[in-house]
Image (spheres, rainbow, N blue to C red):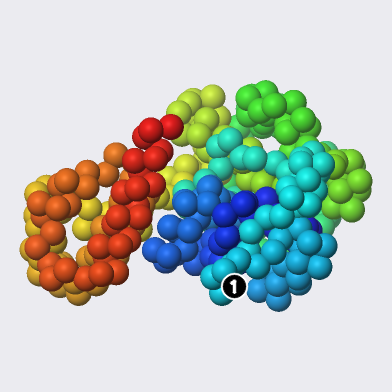
Amino acid sequence: MEAIDLIRFFSDQPQRYKAIYYGLVGKKTISNLLAAKKNHYLVYFHSWPRLSLSTFQKCLQALLKADFITPGAVADSFYLTPAGAHYRQAHQQAIFTPQYYQGLRLPQGQQGLALLYLAIQVISEYHHQQKRYIPSTTNYLLQQRVRQWFLQVKNYPQLPQQLSQELTLWLAALPVDQADFVAQNFQGYQFGFQQSELAEKTPLSLYSQQLVQLDALARLLQAVGQQPQDFPLLSQLLVPNQWVQPILSYSANLTYQAFMAGQSLKRIGYTRRLKDSTIREHILEVALLVPGFDFKQLQQQDDLPPTDYFKIRVAEIQEMSSHEHSN
């Protein structure tokens, strides 16, 4: 993890560092979601699932030592210093901001990329009649999925040309710099770069390099979902509803559907045999993640015993929603 990777998440408002870490690795709690939305990094949720806390803390200490961040009044909170703001501005070329990617919707994005890149490699090697090569991923499950896909499309007329056409259509929808970088990550017969070589070709940090590819994958899944007829091969490899998940958890969505049908919170809990606290967690998740949530409807249908925690959280979320609408 590089300094520019972590410093992008800090501002002039103090925030707890563990909320940032838990957001990056995808620990989905109301507190973490609330902090991520409040501080404008919800889009990055679950974007670095294998980031270790020790690595994160080492980078945090480096930022403190450089006086790029400073402790806030609340324990374990930090905010950006003028020196940190200057550093971030001076290194903007290393930061990539996604346009299509949302971590909550694409939690298995890294596996999706590995699947896609392996499929490209397989078709390339097959086209050149190469049977001995090192696969781009050693993940057995992904290898089996590509194998099954290859057996399905093997007899497609002009298979390599068709795949090339679909990849070109996808990349043409991206900014040129992004498309070039994504294509440089492809591996195949006598082409492809090592990660160290790619790092020398771009000013982007390693984290941003991953975001560039995840964002491109999200755009591809969008295109495949909207125009599957243009992607006869990739639509069989990357079925959108197998990769793009609803923003709400399954259980929270069931609670939300019952809520929208007019059921009171007590009735929902009784019907679903869930604790009051669980129903409230679901409602908070919905209020945080679903645009246009009706807080007046919540007042009418909330017949559970009042708690300070729920009252305070609802007020925080409502204030954020009002601010978003005013902007």
Q: Residue 155, can we see it? A: yes
- Please identify the quadrant where the N terminus is shown: bottom right
Q: Residue 303 sits in which quadrant?
A: bottom left
Question: Which residue carries the number 1 mark?
Answer: 76
Q: Is residue 88 above or below residue 142?
A: above
Residue 68 against residue 295 in the figure, above or below = below
Asked whether, in this view, residue 253 is left or right of residue 220, the answer is left
In the foreground, 229 or 9? 9
Quarter of the rendering containing residue 293: top left
Side (left or right) of 196 relative to 182: right
Which residue does the image show at 49% across and 67% down from the upper left? 27
Give the percent coordinates (x, y) of residue 101.
56, 42
User: Of 283 and 155, which appears nearest the observer?
Assistant: 283
Query: Residue 307: percent from the left, percent from the top?
Result: 21, 71
Residue closest to the eye, 38 or 75: 75
> Badge 1, how many Cα within 10 Å: few under 14, some, many 20+?
few
